[in-house]
Image (cartoon, rainbow, N blue to C red):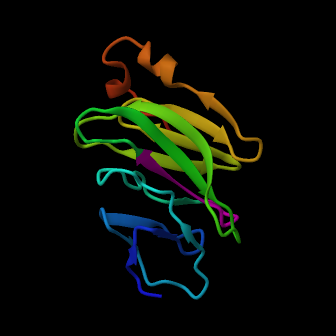
């Protein structure tokens, strides 16, 4: 298996390793691949501007999560971003949350981070959702953030408290 793989596959090394996306066509691990590397087919990305939109986040058990866009034209379209989960030992990614997003024209970013069985998904346009990956339950903070004084999503960053 080569270190750079086509974007039709998702590859991640064990839990303490993250893959970083350096181009729309390749996902390259941030260090040499270890002997056991889980991989799964990526969801079908419709537009050339659709892509894996976050870094890969791994938990202590070996589950990994990431996001991808669907229908992002890079011209301010309103479509969806999906949080995907690849459980340790699984061969297919599972969508665990889908959010309608008014995509920024440029310089947009999404993140996922773990706390136990919970995933925190945030995006630069304002979405902030905590997803319980065991129960598929989500707590959406997006409307609360949007209602804050000031520029709403532009002034707020959501993260787990250490």
Q: Is residue 3 left or right of residue 24?
A: right
Q: Is residue 139 left or right of residue 46?
A: right
- What residue is drawn where x is 71% and y is 71%? 89
| Span highlighted in magenta in the image | 59-69
Check the image and name the residue furthest to the right: 135
Q: Is residue 108 left or right of residue 54?
A: left
- What residue is drawn where x is 58% and y is 27%? 140
Quadrant for the C terminus, please.
top right
Residue 117 % position (x, y) = 71, 49
Mark yes or no: residue 161 visible: no
Residue 136 % position (x, y) = 72, 41
Quarter-wise, where is residue 126 in the image?
A: top left
- What residue is drawn where x is 69% and y is 50%? 116
Does the magenta portion include 108? no
Quarter-wise, where is residue 148 in the image?
A: top left
Above or below, 1 against 11 in this view is below
Above or below, 44 against 79 in this view is below
Does the magenta portion include 67? yes
Above or below, 111 against 137 in this view is below
Residue 44 % position (x, y) = 47, 57
């Amino acid at each position: 298996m080569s270190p750079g793989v086509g974007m039709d596959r998702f590859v991640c090394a064990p839990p303490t390793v993250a893959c970083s996306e350096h181009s729309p066509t390749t996902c390259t691990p941030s260090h040499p691949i270890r002997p056991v590397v889980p991989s799964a087919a990526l969801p079908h990305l419709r537009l050339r501007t659709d892509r894996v939109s976050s870094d890969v986040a791994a938990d202590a058990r070996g589950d990994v999560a990431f996001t991808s866009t669907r229908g992002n034209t890079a011209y301010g379209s309103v479509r969806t971003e999906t949080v995907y989960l690849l459980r340790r030992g699984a061969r297919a990614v599972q969508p665990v949350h889908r959010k309608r997003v008014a995509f920024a024209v440029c310089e947009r970013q999404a993140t996922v981070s773990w706390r136990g069985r919970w995933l925190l998904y945030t995006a630069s346009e304002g979405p902030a959702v905590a997803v319980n990956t065991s129960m598929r339950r989500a707590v959406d903070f997006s409307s609360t953030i949007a209602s804050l004084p000031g520029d709403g999503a532009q002034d707020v960053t959501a993260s787990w408290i250490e």
